[in-house]
Amino acid sequence: MSCLMVERCGAVAFKSWEQNAIQVRMLADGRLNTGHAGVLLAERRGSYPLIDLRILKTSAQQGEVETVTRRKVKRLLSFQRYCHASRLLRGLVPHTPRSLHLLDDDYLGQAAHMLSKVGTWNFDIFLFDRLTNGNSLVTLMCHLFNVYDLIHHFQLDMVKLNRFLGMVQEDYHSQNPYHNAVHAADVTQAMYCYLKEPKLAEHLSPLDVFLGLMAAAAHDVDHPGVNQPFLIKTRHHLASLYQNTSVLESHHWRSTVGMLRESGLLSHLPADMSRDIEQRLGSLILATDINRQNEFLMTFREHLDNQDLDLQLASHRHFILQIALKCADICNPCRVWELSRQWSERVCEEFYRQGDLEKKFDLEISPLCNQQSDSVPAIQIGFISYIVEPLFEEWHRFTEPSLLSQTMLDHLHKNKANWSSLRCAHTPSDVQSRSQAEEPEGEVGEGSDIP
């Protein structure tokens, strides 16, 4: 069954308690919104911020959410979604100082100077975000679309493009320490570096580039700052909608589709082409699910061992785009130490916030989320050892190797050594001896949405 079919089936079940809220929204809009696109628009905005977890508190003995509690959850979610959707439909979404722009004084000044070096691996996305007044994702995407002449090639409407990119940037949660628009911009910049790899660049079509950049920009849109296991154990509606499988990634994809349709960015293209773009974007975004890491790594390794990758084939190029996006998503340990450490501290802060939330509401604390037992160095060493190194070693083979891939591996090894030193410096000697004697299994928990 395709993911789109799953979406439709899930929407049917979801509609049983959502119907009243949809009817209210239709009345507020003054017209009847029908069709699949209407469901997507309703799903996209207002799924978060997270509901009040006080009504999610479960019985420690039974671990079950009572029926009355579920009804409260549904009413609250419906109310949140209605409030946001009705304000949107009436044009009441506030215009903030960070509202959208394509070119402004920041772009023409220091930010423009930085963009001239956007293809270098030591690009400082934190500085760039400050120089663009928090509009790093919009500004970067507009620049890269111009670099590749995608606006002309796909005959894109600049106003619609601006609107779409603004929606994407706005729907990232700025209060998240890690999964925010700056992370999306960082992944997009890394993706651009990978698209420029000589082994890949000469084979890419404009559509490949378009899909790669779009997927990078939107791959974590509307991320709630908690991971999939948290959504499952709190019985969040998205976990039910996507049947506890690739919950966040499915939501990121369907949110992106909703924004594409709401902005009308692809409305001038033939219907079959726009549907194909939506499906391919889904395939790319779903590949970032960390629980599918071994699946992609094994396939990648087999291709390299058999030397049967043919980048003239669209299917093989798409697979490499999936691998490239996965690399871009977890490339933080491959950055220079000053940048890498910032990202590591940010993601661990997000983990710890989830752990504090779980502790507050008597939920089992997720792996890597206990600030008292899960240190930043320990988390990063496990992440590098079990997730990052295996993938980037194969990427290194794929590039045959390139200067960039060698640079990334050098940074990776140095950063791992730095974290090891920090771990030793903050760990008592008796604990060090015991931990070294044990199998370092479980450093990275299943479902932990690590950078």
Image (cartoon, rainbow, N blue to C red):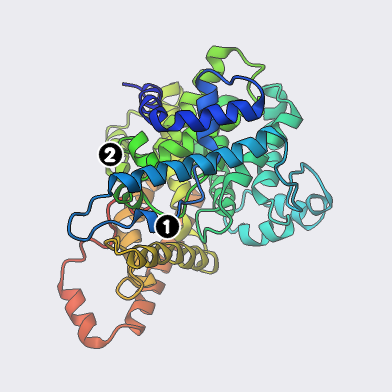
Residue 6 left/right relative to 46: left
- The residue at the point 55 percent across, 16 percent down is 273
As helix, strand or loop, the secondary structure at mark 2 comes to helix
Report which quarter residue 23 is drawn in: top right
As helix, strand or loop, the secondary structure at mark 1 comes to helix
The quadrant in which the N terminus is found is top left
Pointer 1 or 2: first along the chain: 2
- The residue at the point 59 percent across, 56 percent down is 174
The count of marks equals: 2
Can see residue 137? yes
In front of the other: label 1 or label 2? 2
Q: Amino acid at mark 1?
A: Leu
The quadrant in which the C terminus is found is bottom left
Q: Amino acid at mark 2?
A: Glu
- The residue at the point 40 percent across, 46 percent down is 72
Q: Nearer the viewer, residue 341 or 80?
A: 80
Name the residue carrying label 1: 409
Residue 169 left/right relative to 104: left
Q: CA distance from mark 1 to mark 2?
A: 22 Å
Residue 153 left/right relative to 103: left
Q: Residues within 10 Å of mark 1 (few under 14, many from 20)?
A: many
Q: Which mark is residue 295?
A: 2
Q: Is residue 38 above or below residue 225?
A: above
Instruction: List x then y, in percent, for residue 370.
Output: 33, 69
- The residue at the point 31 percent across, 50 percent down is 229
Q: Residues within 10 Å of mark 2 (few under 14, many from 20)?
A: few
Q: Nearer the viewer, residue 364 or 339?
A: 364
Instruction: List x then y, in percent, for residue 330.
Output: 43, 52
Report which quarter residue 211 is drawn in: top right
Q: Which mark is residue 335?
A: none
Instruction: List x then y, in percent, for residue 287.
Output: 39, 38
Q: Is residue 372 above or below residue 416?
A: below
